[in-house]
Structures are given as C-alpha cells and as structure tokens.
Image (spheres, rainbow, N blue to C red):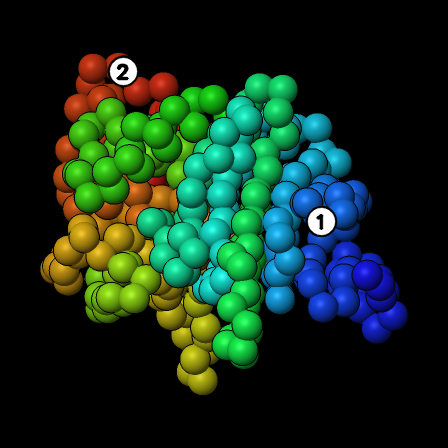
Amino acid sequence: LSFHREMFPVNVIIITGLLVLRCGLKTAFFRFIVLQVRLRCTEGSVRWVHPGQALRVVLEPNLSSSRRGSVCIKPSPSAGGAVFVERAGRLELLVTEDGRSGREVFCFRAEGPHRPAIYIQASPESPGTGTRRRLGFRYELRDIRRAEWDFLLSVHPDPCRPCDDTELLMAICNSDFVVRGLIQNVSHDSVRQTSQVEVLAVRVYWQRSRAFERHVGPSGSSPPWHGHIHTQLRCRVRPGGGEFLFTGSEHFGEAWLGCAPRYKDFLSVYHKARTERRNSYQHLLTNIK
C-alpha cells in the first residue's frame, strides 16, 4: 500500500488502488483480515475501489459534542459487496451485495461507550468478469438535542402520515428549515424511490444551509425563493393549490420533508395553542404567523 498527499487537499488521502477518503484519518492494518480506518471529521465520504476483504470505518470526530449526536449515512451506488452500520456491537445491513439499499439516508443516535462505525464486506471477485467493483458512502455527524431527536423519531418512522397539532408545533421549532410557499411541480424517481417537490417560497423563515435560494432578475426586482424538497415515493405527493408551511430536515445538501400543513391550517393550530397557553415556543412561532 502507498499513500500520496501531493496534489490533493490536506483532508484528502489516497490509498493507491483501494480507498479514497475525503477526511482526515488514522489507519490500522490487519493483514488478510480487516482494514480499519478512523475518521476525525464530522462529515465526509468514503469510496473503496477494487475492495479487498473488509473495511471498518470508525467515526471518531475531534469535536466532543458530536460523540452523543446523530449520525446519518447515505450509501453511494455500489457493486461488489455489502455495507453495514455497526452499533453496540451489532451489524445492521444498509446495502446488499447486489447494490440494493432499503433507504436513501439512514440516521441514528450515537449513544453509549461504542463509537459508531461502518463495516464494508467485499464479495469474492469472480475471475475473468472484468467488473469494476466499488463501495462507499457519505456521512455526517450532528450535535443534536435530545428533544429534537425524540421529535425526529416520532415523526420520521412514517413520513407519509400527516402530523398532529403537537408534532406540527415541535416541527416548526426543531426543523432545519421552515418555509412558506406554493407547490410548483412534483417529479418522481422510481430508481431512488423518491419524489421531489419544487417549491416557490413566499418566505423563508429559516434554513440550516442553502436549500432555498433567490436569484435577482435583470429588472433588479426581488424574486421569490426557490428550492426542492425530497420525500419518499410511497407518500404519493401531488401538486396542490394554496400556500403550505413546509418543515423538515437537511441531509447531504438536500431538504427532506417533515410536516407540511396548509398555511391556514397552521394558523388555526397556532391560535388554538396560544389560547390554551400550551405553546412553549412562542418567540419562534410569533415570527411565522
């Protein structure tokens, strides 16, 4: 094995013929058994080309606040092996050997004494096939509050189910983005099993990254915000008239749908909560109404 740093950024290391890691790392080699890598970044990507027997990637960021945060994994298009999440000493299958993945993004909370790890098991290579085998994934670690994680667990197991009043109020206060706008178009991807909602936003109350952007036209006028929100294909999202209040999470530069009531329905929920004085996020909700 040989390592090369020339002509690459500091946080990119190439292990010739085997592995591409876009993150700072420490490695440990177990001959003929497992190649182990410890990644120090809070986000990054791994690509293993012509894989050997097995690779174990331990997520060990320098930031202590990330130790008990959330971990999200997005498998890359793969061929030639299986990808697992290792937590509490047990393996959970993410990608099968034929490249099928049960979900687009897999998130879990990193708790307990064990560091989260991704385990890649390469399939035996058939002689004479000439098929280029590749395995990999992207990951991100986020410092997340217990209340926010409990909210994600309560809503996201079934993203197609409409949110109740309590879930809606929590979504507004804990989501990565809150946007008021119109559905301009809905497209479907049968391969990824996802739908993409094109949103023309009247107002962006907040967003963690830049999922929604505005581009000033030649006239210099201030146009509405524009962005895309992803959800699962099985939710059967369709275009609908009127304004909606979109909430959700952001992973790997993509916005994912959480609660999305019609704006007039949100106002009813807000006024009801205010009358009953059961709203603990008054300072946030006041800005939205």
Q: Which residue is mark 1?
A: 32
Residue type at mark 1: give it. Answer: Phe
* Residue 274 pos. (x, y %): 24, 22
What kind of element bears circle 1?
loop
What residue occupies the far bottom of the structure in this picture? 218
Q: Is residue 70 above or below residue 80?
A: above
**Which quadrant is home to the C terminus?**
top left
Q: For residue 113, which quarter of the picture?
A: top right
243 left or right of 81? Answer: left
Name the residue at 24% across, 25% down: 166
Q: Nearer the viewer, mark 1 or mark 2?
A: 1
Name the residue at 55% across, 55% down: 122
Q: For residue 142, which quarter of the picture?
A: top right
What kind of element bears circle 2?
loop
* Residue 89 pos. (x, y %): 55, 26
Of labels 1 and 2, earlier in sequence is 1
* Residue 253 pos. (x, y %): 49, 57
Q: Is residue 195 above or below residue 260?
A: below
Residue type at mark 2: give it. Answer: Arg
- The crowd level at tag 2 (other Cα within 10 Å; few <14, some 14-19, many 20+) is few
Q: Is residue 228 visible?
A: yes
- In contact (CB < 8 Å): disc 1 and disc 2: no
256 left or right of 10? Answer: left
19 left or right of 195? Answer: right
Name the residue at 22% across, 50% down: 244
Q: Which residue is mark 2?
A: 278
